[in-house]
Amino acid sequence: MSRKFMDENFLLSSETAIHLFHSYAKDMPIIDYHCHLSPQEIYENKTFNNITEAWLYGDHYKWRVMRANGVEEKFITGDASDYEKFLAWSRTVPKIIGNPLYHWTHLELQRFFGVYDLLNEANAPKIWDEVNRQLQGEGYGARDLIVKSKVTVVCTTDDPVDTLEYHEKISSLSGFNVSVVPGFRPDKALEINRPTFQPWVAQLSEVSGMAVENYGQFLAALESRMRFFHARAGRVSDHALDAVMFEPTTLEEATAIFAKALYEGTVSESEEKKYKGFTLVFLGKLYSELDWAMQFHIHALRNNNSVMFGRLGPDTGYDSINDGVIAKPLAGLLDALDRENALPKTILYSLNPNDNHVIAGLMGCFQGGGIPGKIQFGTAWWFNDNKDGMLEQMKTLANLGVLSQFVGMLTDSRSFLSYTRHEYFRRILCDLVGSWVEAGEAPDDMELLGGMIENICYNNADHYFNFSKQALVTR
């Protein structure tokens, strides 16, 4: 007998899983330790004119499946009206059964708007009117949606040259008891061969108020920005390592490579590996000193469609999964930091699921310091944050590491409605653990397993990042 679609026991296939979710996971708060939400929109408590603005603006997950469903670009990123774009999405949704977007779409309708109808072209006008009516009422601004989702910490993604003015403004708000902290994302400092490098160095000099004419000055300016972030509650860095590059070098050689890039524009691949390796080790030492967590997002292949990149720019749905060697350079980088007793807490993500065992095996080589889960295998990311991807990530971690010390889910999203992904993850987690109990592979001890579930959902991240502790000081 078939079950009702997305009922209260959605994704929970056993009585044990049902108990674990409803008794332990469901009501846990959220630490969103990596996302792409706008601090300005949070401060201004941005409201949305309609569901298209809240749902489809900037959401390249949806854009990709709309294109695959034959929707013209006019109704995706073009000049069609918001209502026409919503109708195009409503025609797409019934076609994407099996894609996590089908579940996420209906979770968001249910949790935020109390709409339990299955979205399709026939009922789209009714859902459009109902959801938009609610969006125009009280309690649907950006901050309101964060609070409704029981979020305690939001960690945004910020360039080192950012002024963090909106983080400061948020920290002075009364009645908003959510810590919104910056995440240090120095990709432009590392990408020495991109055309953005030279202008970004000039920006760094201007914002830091320091001359940046050589590598030593560059590192000093980077450090000053990191300490600026730290003073404003920053406790996390993040790096997009589309290709993991590391080659041992000296300060003198790195200095010469930096000068070549600054004045000639490009360097060789070997020089790039040396520069990135030395700079990452420098940054890692500072992260360790400041007790930050360092995140590496590995193996994205970006902007593959040059025609559409020229029309729409980055982050518009034309990225994919990269392949290549990561084990040796990643081991070299982590080892270089560990040799100097300066390896920070580190979270490793890969967009390529073929890397799962590589990462989970490698991280076991660098645990220590009395820190539970010091080196983390990050949650299933981007193309992997679906049921199968989450299960494979957690099973790999359980097989090769300590699942009970996992820091759990994040949104990695630009949408204020995406917090339902934490519920999605928690249901899958409870079903996995429940399946072990049902098969006799884990003890039927709800105190033990319930505590494990609560820790993965929230407590581990709270302890790992120390956001709660520092929030008392900074707010």
Image (cartoon, helix red, strand yellow):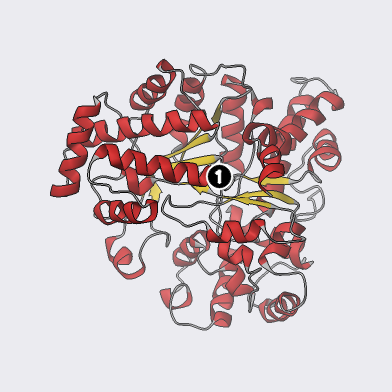
Residue on which disc 1 sits: 231
Residue 313, percent across and down? Answer: 35, 64
Q: In the rendered view, does 264 fall on the left or right side of 184?
A: left
Q: Residue at x 34, y 56 (%)?
A: 206
Residue 197, percent across and down? Answer: 27, 51
Asked which quadrant contains residue 104, the reply is bottom right
Q: Secondary structure at mark 1?
A: helix
Asked which quadrant contains residue 473, the reply is top right
Residue 399, percent across and down? Answer: 59, 21
The amino acid on which the numbered mark 1 sits, given as a three-letter code, is Ala
Task: For label 1, count other residues whose C-alpha is less than 10 Å away and answer few (under 14), some (14-19) or many (20+).
Answer: few
Q: Residue at x 43, y 52 (%)?
A: 159
Asked which quadrant contains residue 200, the reply is bottom left
456 or 60: nearer the viewer: 456
Q: In the rendered view, does 393 fall on the left or right side of 319?
A: right
| Residue 19 sits above or below residue 61 on the image | above
| Residue 91 sits above or below residue 17 on the image | below
Q: Residue at x 19, y 29 (%)?
A: 253
Residue 251, percent across and down? Answer: 25, 28
10 or 160: nearer the viewer: 160
